[in-house]
Image: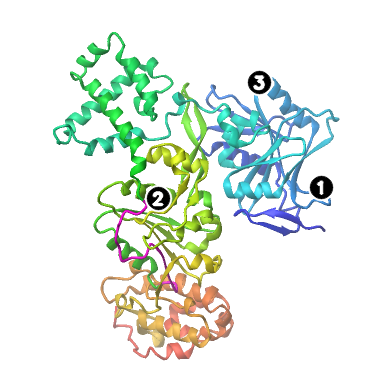
């Protein structure tokens, strides 16, 4: 049987056999995937086959009568079909199914043709331009798409592939289903980068993507009057109410903007305000609403937009912020050594005088789009009040922290802004960081030594958040007041390796296997029953197990740190509740030793167990309840001779 290429959930392409039973979606599974996609944003969507005769055509209907139903000709994709091409997926659907959907489209209804690809629990919809077929009704019509296109969609959400006829096939995650449906009429003839020329929501539907109102409120709290005093809270409330009154009174003159705060361009704002102020009733309107507060607000908002436009030049990558802590830092060590705990302590010290932080946890499916930013579907209500979907750039934790650091760089008192990455090596860091990798090279001034070119999407986002035009952000660098700290556990299974080039851009802080052990010293628990009953110090037991693992030549990063059992599971005092400890010990310590650290040495480590039980996790746990530390080999159990009678230690 020939092998075919497959796109995994993280976008990696592998070669494997094709199993028709597990790799082919049934009609019920296709229906389930469609239903999941159309209900994901809270829509009341009902999905069903169009009819018994049209079993591969589905109708998506909505409870709201104002929402038109959608016809979808859909089937699960399968590999190849063309023996010399093992790098593609295809669908084969009868001509009658395709023509049914096509006729719906020609009659003014929404209709599309989709293939459904699934791997690693991730679903990608493949889409082709819906065309009339001249073949007999029962003749299967084949549609193909490259596996590389599907893989890219896994990583970035939406991808197009140019076909030999000049049209584009599309592949996308289910989050983009509404975006595709609304734009299918042009997506197969044009690249998505040309989307600005097509039918996107107008300003009155979605408003400005920049939150000018919130930015104005923050600006208003520190801006001063001509006499050097701040505006009172009462005055600020009056001016903000004035903004709402202007938006209500002059709806037509503001069009297509719904609110004053939707306007970001100062030239557009000036033209609109000039028209409003020339209105014959404007002076009376201003007098009757707070005796001049309307006019005062309009002047203040003009000042706000002016200062916002000028602030680009005030951005500093070198703020002079001094700190003894490294900017790029990775805390690493064996499990339970307190990496996150230590990071949090030093984070609090770093931010003691101000600043902010954001925390993110990497995982195998984490991507550049998650970390930095990408276009994503955003729900909104259109001018008719109907639920709809638009497509907007959404920043990731890196870009959010970056913007905050740059905003702060404009002040005379720079503060640190920290991005915390937990489990950094659980994702493919080379792919997640992408070109940001180059920014990690810090110069003597602690800012990025080498800038990178920002994408068009990123430039527009930065301009919206920081002011100015997108061209002001053609090159970006990490400022000296931005810190990136991470934790790493190289002992865990399923982690990604880091290359040397990536590692050398970080300062590594190693936490030893017994660092911070003073926090658990003296904490004791009664384990075992009858002759096995012992008063055991948890730290001593941990060290005894670690010593035995070292005798087995187990690497140090596989040993157990002091907080392998979390601090929250240990009492403040010295006496540990036996029942609670037994549950935690079985679920954490025994499982870790059995599945990972001592997987090849079970018979030796669990030498105190019945010989037949040493390779059965459940049996070892059962014996632990009775034998306590005596489930382990003699070199461990013999260290605990403090026998306790049944009447003591309760």
Q: Are marks 3 and 1 in contact (CB under 8 Å)?
A: no
Name the colour scheme.
rainbow
Measured as percent of width and height from the top left, residue 116 is found at: 67, 43
Secondary element at image label 3: loop
Q: In which quarter of the image is the N terminus?
A: bottom right
For this rendering, which residue is in front, 324 or 351?
A: 324
Residue at point 45%, 43% (across, down) = 473
Q: Is 443 located above or below residue 510 in the figure?
A: above
Q: Give the range drawn in magenta.
A: 317-336
Q: Are marks 3 and 2 in contact (CB under 8 Å)?
A: no
Q: Name the residue under label 2.
A: 402
Q: Who comes first in sequence, dot 2 or dot 1?
A: 1
- Mark 2, mark 1: which one is toward the viewer? 2
Is residue 189 rendered to the left or right of residue 350? right
**Is residue 405 visible in the rendered structure shown here?**
yes
Secondary element at image label 2: helix
Q: Magenta part mainly helix, strand or loop?
A: loop
**Is residue 53 visible in the rendered structure shown here?**
no
Residue located farthest toward the top when viewing the structure as drawn: 280
For the residues marked 2 and 1, what is the alpha-carbon distance in whole angstroms? Answer: 48 Å
For the residues marked 3 and 1, what is the alpha-carbon distance in whole angstroms? Answer: 34 Å
Within 10 Å of the Cα at label 3, are there few (<14), some (14-19), or many (20+) other Cα atoms?
A: few
Measured as percent of width and height from the top left, residue 525 is found at: 34, 78
Q: Mark 1 points at which residue?
A: 81
């Amino acid at each position: 049987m020939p092998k075919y290429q497959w796109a995994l959930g993280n976008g990696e392409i592998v070669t494997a056999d094709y199993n028709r039973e597990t790799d082919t979606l049934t009609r019920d599974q296709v229906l389930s995937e469609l239903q999941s996609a159309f209900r994901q944003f809270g829509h009341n969507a009902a999905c069903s086959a169009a009819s018994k005769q049209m079993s591969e055509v589905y109708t998506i209907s909505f409870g709201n009568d104002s929402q038109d139903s959608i016809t979808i000709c859909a089937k699960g994709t399968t590999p190849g079909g063309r023996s010399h091409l093992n790098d593609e997926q295809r669908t084969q659907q009868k001509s009658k199914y395709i023509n049914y959907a096509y006729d719906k489209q020609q009659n003014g209804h929404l209709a599309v043709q989709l293939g459904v690809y699934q791997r690693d629990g991730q679903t990608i919809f493949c889409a082709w331009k819906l065309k009339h077929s001249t073949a007999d009704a029962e003749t299967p019509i084949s549609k193909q798409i490259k596996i590389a296109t599907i893989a890219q969609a896994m990583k970035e959400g939406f991808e197009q592939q140019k076909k030999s006829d000049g049209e584009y096939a599309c592949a996308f995650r289910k989050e983009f289903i509404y975006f595709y449906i609304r734009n299918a009429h042009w997506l197969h003839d044009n690249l998505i980068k040309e989307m600005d020329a097509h039918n996107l929501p107008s300003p009155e539907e979605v408003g400005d993507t920049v939150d000018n109102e919130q930015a104005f409120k923050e600006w208003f709290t520190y801006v001063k009057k001509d006499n050097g005093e701040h505006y009172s809270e009462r005055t600020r409330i009056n001016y903000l109410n004035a903004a709402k009154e202007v938006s209500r009174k002059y709806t037509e003159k503001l069009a297509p903007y719904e609110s004053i705060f939707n306007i970001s361009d100062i030239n557009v704002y000036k033209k609109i305000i000039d028209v409003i102020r020339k209105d014959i009733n404007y002076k009376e309107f201003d007098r009757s609403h707070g005796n001049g507060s309307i006019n005062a607000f309009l002047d203040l908002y003009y000042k706000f937009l002016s200062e916002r436009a000028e602030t680009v030049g005030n951005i500093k990558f070198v703020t002079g912020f001094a700190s003894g802590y490294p900017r790029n830092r990775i805390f690493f060590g064996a499990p339970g050594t307190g990496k996150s705990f230590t990071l949090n302590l030093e984070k609090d010290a770093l931010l003691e005088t101000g600043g902010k932080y954001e925390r993110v946890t990497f995982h195998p499916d984490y991507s550049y789009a998650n970390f930095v930013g990408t276009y994503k579907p955003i729900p909104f209500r259109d001018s008719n009040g109907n639920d709809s979907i638009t497509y907007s750039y959404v920043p990731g934790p890196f870009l959010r922290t970056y913007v905050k650091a740059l905003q702060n760089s404009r002040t005379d008192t720079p503060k640190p802004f920290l991005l915390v990455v937990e489990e950094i090596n659980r994702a493919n860091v080379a792919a997640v960081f992408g070109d940001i990798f180059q920014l990690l090279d810090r110069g003597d001034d602690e800012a990025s030594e080498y800038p990178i070119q920002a994408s068009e999407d990123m430039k527009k986002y930065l301009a919206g958040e920081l002011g100015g035009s997108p061209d002001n952000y053609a090159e970006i660098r990490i400022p000296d007041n931005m810190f990136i700290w991470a934790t790493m556990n190289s002992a865990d299974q399923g982690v990604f390796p880091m290359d040397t080039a990536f590692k050398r851009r970080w300062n590594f802080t190693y936490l030893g296997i017994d660092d911070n052990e003073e926090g658990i010293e003296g904490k004791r628990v009664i384990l075992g029953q009858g002759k096995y009953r012992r008063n055991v110090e948890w730290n001593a037991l941990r060290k005894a197990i670690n010593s035995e693992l070292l005798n087995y030549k187990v690497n140090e990063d596989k040993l157990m740190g002091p907080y392998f059992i979390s601090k929250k599971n240990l009492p403040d005092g010295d006496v540990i509740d036996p029942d609670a400890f037994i549950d935690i010990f079985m679920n954490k310590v025994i499982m870790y030793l059995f599945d990972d650290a001592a997987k090849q040495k079970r018979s030796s480590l669990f030498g105190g167990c019945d010989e037949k039980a040493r390779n059965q996790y459940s049996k070892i746990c059962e014996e632990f309840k009775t034998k306590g530390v005596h489930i382990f080999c003699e070199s461990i159990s013999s260290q605990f001779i403090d026998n306790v009678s049944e009447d003591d230690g309760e």
